Image (cartoon, rainbow, N blue to C red):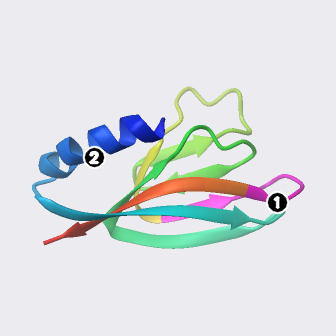
Amino acid sequence: MSESFILGYVPQRIKQLGFNRYHLRYRDLVIRENERIWLAAYNELFFLVDDPPGIVVESDYGIYDSTDDELPENVHQHRGEIVISNPGQGTRRVKVIQIIIVN
């Protein structure tokens, strides 16, 4: 997803979830070789910006896997328990837009 698409889509998506207010945060995550990070995002949405190469993201919403050509669909929106991993060699960067829902 492009950054401009995400920024245009977020207000609609927040309303679909039954909320009106949110905070937006840009994050640039560094994932080292063979590293996994866990994020608890139960009251948040994470959107992957563009298509980060060599990264696998798993969450309650589905999987994004740029290392597997056989995956029929890559999910760019994530929520719940999120696991981001770099199964390859070298350090990777993942840019995300984090939406924190405010009740």
Identity of the amino acid at label 1? Thr
In this rendering, position of residue 98 left or right of residue 93? left
Q: Secondary structure at mark 2?
A: helix
Identity of the amino acid at label 2? Val
In the image, residue 40 above or below residue 14:
below
Residue occupying the far right of the picture: 89
Q: Earlier in the sequence, mark 2 or mark 1?
A: 2
In this rendering, position of residue 27 left or right of residue 60? right
Say whether residue 103 is magenta: no
In this rendering, position of residue 90 left or right of residue 23? right
In the image, residue 1 above or below residue 72:
below
Residue ID at (70%, 56%)? 93
- Residue matched to label 1: 91
In this rendering, position of residue 77 left or right of residue 51? left
- Residue matched to label 2: 10
Whole-angstrom CA distance, mark 2 to mark 1, is 29 Å
Quick check: marks 2 and 1 in contact, CB under 8 Å? Answer: no
**x and y percentages locating residue 42 in the rendered image:** 33, 69
**x and y percentages locating residue 19 in the rendered image:** 12, 59
The quarter of the displayed image where residue 60 is located: bottom left
Q: Crowdedness of circle 1 by 10 Å Cα count: few (<14), some, many (20+)?
A: few
The quarter of the displayed image where residue 32 is located: bottom right
Using the image as rendered, state which of residue 60 and residue 54 is in the foreground. 54
Residue ID at (50%, 71%)? 39
Residue ID at (76%, 56%)? 92
Residue ID at (70%, 65%)? 30
Q: Crowdedness of circle 2 by 10 Å Cα count: few (<14), some, many (20+)?
A: some
Give the quarter of the figure containing the C terminus: bottom left
Chain part drawn in magenta: 82-92
